[in-house]
Image (cartoon, helix red, strand yellow):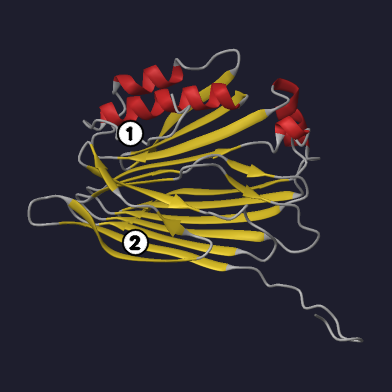
Amino acid sequence: MVAAGSSLRVSRGLAGHLDIVCAADSEGRSYLRHQSFRAPIHLSKPHFDEGVLVVNVVNPTAGLLAGDRIEYRACAENGAALSLTAPSASRAHRMSTGQAEVVQNLRVARGGWLESWPELFIPQGGTRFRQSTNIIVEEGGELLFFESLAPGRVASGEAFAFAELVWETDLFVGDAHIVRERYRVVPGDEAVRALRRQFDHAYYASCFAVSPLFVSELPCWTAINALHGANVWIGCGALGHGGWVVKCVADGSIALRRTLAAVRRELHAAAGRREPALRRAGFA
């Protein structure tokens, strides 16, 4: 109860975090050497598949609200193989003021493997969201870093109804800064209008891939470019130091999911690995 004449205090939001380190034991099996998390982040029980430790990162709340700030830190040490994923889409809700923010710091040691596969991010009408990602891959480390973005709650008529999205990504391989990506998306911008002239409900995804095995003549790059079609625009290119980027825009979530599943299969095969199952309905 609020006393007469007093004012309600505005919540500053949740300050959540995830901090994990994946290491290899004496028999080469991956395990979480260190783990720490705080609401609204929770970890489900990790499981092994195809020699990889699969960790589901869960947000059991309805989604991000104004003032929420989440920090993710994950490291795959030498000999460790870690796959980070999520069981469902993440959401950010309407915000009259303020913004929600996610800060990610990922590191892969020489001889380590890290795959990050979150589910779709769905920005609801009126939301403001900022994401900053810093990835460091030591020479000899391997990375698959996926992201996917919905235009909003399409079924509720909220395509591109968010207020603002800001994305910042930096990727280092060894001492080389091979990716510096910055973009700000506002629904009324000409770039968004041009995109919607092609796909009114455009879904976006990207993947940064790093491995000493990812050379320019691999058949997978031809196979990925061949996924381009009427309802999916996709392309890939070399970044240097064993790094590659894949960008995709699709006319709907089903086309996006099928395309990303194909990209994931190609990249795992090119790295000489079998893809661990993510145990999520409707993935393929």
The residues tagged by marks 1 and 2 sit, at their Cα atoms, a distance apart of: 21 Å
The answer to whether residue 9 is above or below residue 156 is: below
Q: In this view, does 106 lie to the left or right of 271?
A: right
Mark 2 crowd level (few <14, some 14–19, many ≥20, 10 Å Cα): some
| Kind of residue at disc 1 | Ala
Q: In this view, does 105 lie to the left or right of 103?
A: left
Q: Residue drawn 38% across and 35% down?
A: 279
Residue 102 in the image: state x and y as whole percent.
Answer: 55, 58
The answer to whether residue 239 is above or below residue 69 is: above
Residue 225 in the image: state x and y as whole percent.
Answer: 45, 19
Q: Which of marks 1 and 2 is nearer the N terminus?
A: 2
Q: Is mark 1 on a helix, strand or loop?
A: loop
Q: Nearer the viewer, residue 235 or 40?
A: 40
Q: Tell me the quadrant of the picture where the C terminus can be found.
A: top left
Q: Which mark is residue 20?
A: 2
What residue occupies the far left of the structure in this picture? 27
Q: Tell me the quadrant of the picture where the N terminus can be found.
A: bottom right
What residue occupies the far top of the structure in this picture? 230
Mark 1 crowd level (few <14, some 14–19, many ≥20, 10 Å Cα): few
- Tell me whether the residue at label 1 lies in contact with that at label 2, contact meaning CB atoms closer than 8 angstroms: no
Q: Residue drawn 19% across and 55% down?
A: 78
Q: Residue 277 carries which label?
A: 1
Q: Residue drawn 74% across and 27% down?
A: 196
Q: Nearer the viewer, residue 283 or 162?
A: 283
| Kind of residue at disc 2 | Ile
Residue 179 in the image: state x and y as whole percent.
Answer: 46, 47
What residue occupies the far right of the structure in this picture? 5
Q: Nearer the viewer, residue 195 or 11?
A: 11
Q: Is mark 2 on a helix, strand or loop?
A: strand
Q: Which of 32 and 100 is in front in this view?
A: 32
Q: Is residue 144 left or right of residue 197?
A: left
